[in-house]
Amino acid sequence: MANKTSRRKKKYSGIGGQAVLEGVMMKNKEKYAVAVRKPSGEIAVEVENFQGMMHGSRLLEIPFIRGVFNFINSLVLGTRSLNYSASFYEEDEEGTMVDKALDKVSGGRGEKMISLLVTLISIVLALGLFVLLPYFISSYFEGFIRNHSLLMILEGLIRIAIFLGYVVAISMMKDIRRLYQYHGAEHKCINCIEGGRELTVENVMRASRFHKRCGTSFIFFVLIVSIVLFFFIRVDNVLYRILLRIALMPVVAGISYELIRLAGKYDNLFVNLLSAPGFLFQKLTTKEPDEEMVEVAIASVNAVFDWKEYLAETFDYVWDEDEG
């Protein structure tokens, strides 16, 4: 049993994660773990290191620039984690002909190649759906709305509407709803330990399923920041408008990353107001998990993060000797 000598506001722990198929991925520094509830009911945990793009480069220390590389690294790691979790539910255990061919060509690195390919396709699809489509839809109103600023606001509102429609549509799928429940379990675990509580199923179930550093909140910042930046695109050529929107997306990602980083590290009125719209979005992308889902999320945390040491250093917990 642990004795708590003080209680303070939530403190940044440095861990983050992602929901995967019937499981949760948690990352702490360069180490990450994917915990999955197998069809047999057993929890499988894989622990690996992930250094990512530009590892060791000083570019990752420069504000606004680091966000671009961290965003790409998150996509790559997320895809890799999803592929691992999906492997437990594939009917063909030996892999498809495509898998075998890629392994042969790449010298056994077929899975990494697939992850990279899926990531690139995801980026292209996201640009088409959330950047280009809103522009083309809003362009139809140019004959009725002559004010450039109003058109930019309309384009931004269309972008938000498309995102909301996409989230609501996929949430109707059973597998996605379960994914959202695991997303909630991931947030609850982080909120539990960052709130100064022991990582038990009971404590996690009582924690909030909303978190300031959530990827959903990051997307909200992307949507809002893009509206502001696109105000400055004032060219008549349609091709230039499209190219400038695409070219500005790394800038949008860099600014949004700094905002989500700020929100995750501090707990004050300004940050809470900044995070509030993202919490509304998370009402759609997180659902309350059951206890078995929480057990999986806890297993993922335990594999990469010493939460007992964190509570002792941050919240002055005193652990009995038999607890370590």
Image (spheres, rainbow, N blue to C red):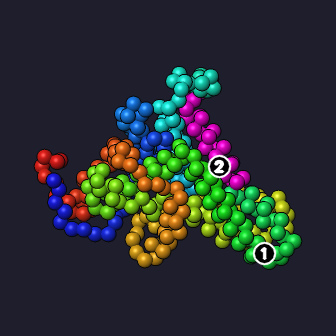
> Horizontal and vertical percent for residue 113?
59, 34
Q: Which of 26 and 143 is in front in this view?
A: 143
Residue that carries the numbered disc 1 in the rendered image: 148
Q: Could you tell me how far apart the alpha carbons at marks 2 and 1 are, in whole angstroms?
A: 28 Å
Q: For label 1, count other residues whose C-alpha is less than 10 Å away and answer few (under 14), some (14-19) or many (20+).
A: some
Residue 77 visible in this rendered orientation of the protein: no
Q: Nearer the viewer, residue 20 or 310?
A: 20
Lateral position of residue 136 relative to residue 303, left or right: right
The magenta-colored residue range is: 106-129
Q: Which of marks 2 and 1 is nearer the N terminus?
A: 2
> Horizontal and vertical percent for residue 319?
16, 54
Tell me which secondary structure the magenta stretch mostly adopts. Answer: helix
> Horizontal and vertical percent for residue 315?
24, 63
Kind of residue sitting beneath label 1: His
Q: For label 2, count other residues whose C-alpha is less than 10 Å away and answer few (under 14), some (14-19) or many (20+).
A: some
Report helix, strand or loop for mark 2.
helix
- Residue 242 belongs to the span the image colors magenta: no
Above or below 15: residue 212: below
Where residue 123 is drawn, which disc sits there?
2
Instruction: Residue at 29%, 56% (x, y): give it.
Output: 203
Kind of residue sitting beneath label 2: Ile
Report helix, strand or loop for mark 1.
helix
